[in-house]
Image (spheres, helix red, strand yellow):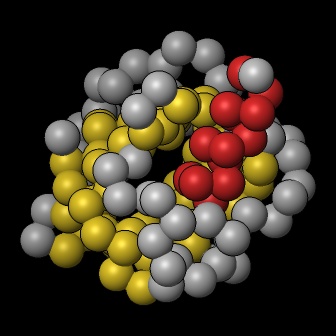
Amino acid sequence: MRFIAAMIAVVMVTGCGGSGESGTAEGGSAGGGSETAPEGDPLVGTWEVVEVIAGPDYGNTGTVYVFNGDGTMSSGIGHLAVEGTYVVIGDTLRVVLGGVSLDVLHSFQDGDLVYDLADGEQTFLMERR
């Protein structure tokens, strides 16, 4: 049952944008992590999807993402959650979440995070929590 819940979370988090490759991102581990932001790192913290601004909403609105300062992350909605890692490469996040690898273009607009699945059809607007 846990496996099924984790897979549902991965599908919800990645939409249809995951590459299906597995591995670990450089510089991070899937451990507990720390939500302490390095000085000037606007990504680190807790973010909630408040709107799907492009593509269909596969139940992503309300999903909470936590980016930790050590390169670990988690994502979940309700009682479903999945852990992973991320690396920032310019304006791209290389994310490995629940064993699924994907690239996400990210930017900040008026303090909000725009999270655009590079190989997918969805773009999320997230607010800091």
Q: Is residue 44 something that shows in the picture?
A: no
Residue at the location (61% across, 16% down)?
A: 31
Image coordinates of residue 6 in percent, x first then y, are 69, 33
Between residue 119 and residue 25, name the one nearer to us: 119
Residue 106 falls in image quadrant? bottom left
The mark total stands at 0
Image coordinates of residue 22 in percent, x first then y, are 87, 46
Task: Quadrant for the C terminus, please.
Answer: top left
**Where 90 falls versus 48 (above or below)?**
below
Between residue 82 and residue 27, name the one nearer to us: 82
Q: Is residue 120 left or right of residue 1?
A: left
Q: Which residue extends farthest top?
A: 32
Image coordinates of residue 50 in percent, x first then y, are 25, 61
Residue 3 falls in image quadrant? top right
Residue at the location (64% across, 78% down)?
A: 120
Residue at the location (86% across, 58% down)?
A: 20
